């Protein structure tokens, strides 16, 4: 009921642009390879968010770095983490 009342009142919800912090290992990968950074930011916001969440999950930095390296080519290809149709 409350949501309906808010909608009728005309209030707008403002979304945060980047709710998830970018992991340090991903920032380091961007520093080492500027074309990788450009390829990452060329992805849609949803695809970027998916990768950021996935890369941030492991507790160990070595695992986070490994995930970034594993999916680097997929990012260069403009494919999202969960895009099944684009993978061979």
Image (cartoon, grey):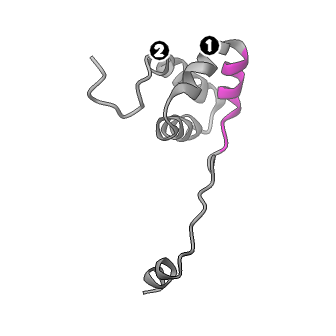
Q: Dot 1: what SS?
A: helix
Label ID, residue 73: 2
Q: Secondary structure at mark 2?
A: helix
Residue at 70% across, 27% down: 27
Q: Which quadrant of the figure contains the C terminus?
A: top left
Does residue 34 show up magenta in the picture? no
> Which residues are drawn in magenta?
21-31
Left or right, 51 with reference to 62 = left
Q: Is residue 64 left or right of residue 50?
A: right
Q: Position of residue 18 (x, y in %)?
A: 63, 46
Q: Quadrant of residue 33?
A: top right
Q: Residue at x 42, y 31 (%)?
A: 81
Q: Position of residue 5 (x, y in %)?
A: 48, 85
Q: Nearer the viewer, residue 43 or 52?
A: 43
Residue at (48, 41) in percent of width and height = 46
Rounded to the nearest angstrom, the CA distance separating label 2 from label 1 is 12 Å
**Residue shown at 57% from the left, 74% from the top:** 11
């Amino acid at each position: 009921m409350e949501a309906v009342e808010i909608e009728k009142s005309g209030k707008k919800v403002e979304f945060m642009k980047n709710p998830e912090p970018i992991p340090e290992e991903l920032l380091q990968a961007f520093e080492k390879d500027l074309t990788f950074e450009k390829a990452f930011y060329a992805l849609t916001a949803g695809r970027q968010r998916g990768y950021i969440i996935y890369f941030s999950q492991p507790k160990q930095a070595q695992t986070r770095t490994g995930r970034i390296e594993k999916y680097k080519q997929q990012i260069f290809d403009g494919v999202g983490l969960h895009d099944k149709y684009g993978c061979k």
